[in-house]
Image (cartoon, grey):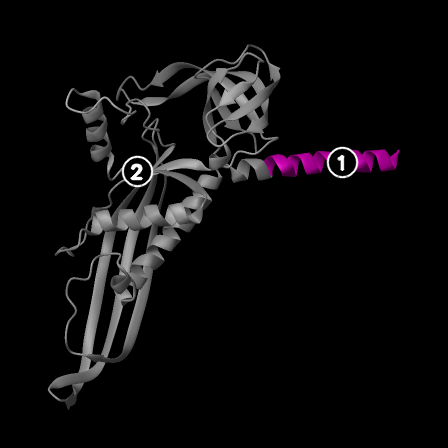
Amino acid sequence: MRKMIFFAGVFLFASFCSGTAHAAALKKTVAVSDFENKTNAAGAWQIGTGMADMLTDSLIQSGQFIVLERQALNAVLAEQNLAAGNRASKAGTGAQTGNIKKAQILIQGAVTEFDENKSEGGQGLSLYGVSVRAKSATAHVAVIIRLIDTTTSQVLASQRVEGDASSSGVGFSASVSGVGFGQEAFKKTPMGKATQMAIDRAVQYIASQMAALPWKGKVIKTDESGMVLVNAGASSGMVQGQVLRLARPGESVVDPDTGMELGQEAKVLGTVNVAEVLDKYSKAKPVVLSSPAQAGDLVEALQ
């Protein structure tokens, strides 16, 4: 009897761990907006756009998220408008409207500190007209990162991240101009290293906060065999055996004073189990449903 209880406990624990691992593997959808530059640093560098690009790239490289393009959204919309108009060739598929994905979380940033101090020691050694002297530099970057719910516009989390770097040695007095923000030459400077350090810490913070949020998706449709098609596949980290809670969206809850949407009432219908995973979508088998699934129903990963 004890053996049966032990094996049952092991089975339940393994099932729980498996479900948790599945949910953790699912990639949540985020978008990064341009950072606000609140420092005195300006010049040729577009610091806000540059840091947003660096964060976008780092989030993609982490492999933990589906990152949507927002910096070039106007260009995407212009291409769709061109394809929908009469000036573009009708041959081929062209850019289609109505397919821009919505991010679960919008990431905003504000650069509050972007400082670099340089110093040179003495006259140094002059050789063939070129001055060689000791140099040192320190850099400090600080950014405030905010995670915003795209449905309610509520700020879910906010954190200040910083980066510091320094260098010293012997260098030439000739200055290097035309170094672009985020380029390889920039990355080797103390300012570049401090910026990347702040970005790396931002990614760690975002990942830790996003881990506490449930993954959410939607039902595409129900096929002839009764399988529920969900808008997430292998590219989103979906795996066979993932259990999803299914709910039907209801009336939006709106603040009467501000007009802000606070959320949406939803009726839980039951659960489905992912049976087949394709690249862009998955097929799930109903487990317990009080009503058949339909397009637009909400799904949420059970952790």
Horizontal and vertical percent position of residue 205: 41, 48
In-front residue for pair 284/36? 284
Q: How far apart are marks 2 and 1 (CA)?
A: 45 Å
Whether residue 133 is situated above or below residue 92 in the rendered picture: below
Q: Which quadrant of the figure contains the N terminus?
A: top right
Q: In which quarter of the image is residue 183?
A: bottom left
Mark 2 lies on a secondary structure that is loop
Q: Which residue lies furthest to the front in this view?
A: 91
- Mark 2 sits on what residue? 69
Q: Which quadrant of the figure contains the C terminus?
A: top right
- Mark 1 sits on what residue? 9
Horizontal and vertical percent position of residue 118: 20, 72
Q: In which quarter of the image is residue 117?
A: bottom left
Residue type, numbered disc 2: Glu
> Residue 10 colored magenta?
yes
Q: In this view, does 116 lie to the left or right of 93?
A: left
Task: Say which label, 2 or 1, has the lower sequence index.
Answer: 1
Q: Magenta stretch mostly in which secondary structure?
A: helix
Q: Quadrant of residue 263?
A: top left
Q: Residue furthest top?
A: 291
Residue type, numbered disc 1: Gly
Whether residue 100 is situated above or below residue 171 in the rendered picture: above
Q: In this view, does 80 lie to the left or right of 147?
A: left
Residue at position x 14%, y 23% from top?
87
In-front residue for pair 155/44? 44
* Magenta residues, start to end: 1-20
Horizontal and vertical percent position of residue 93: 30, 24
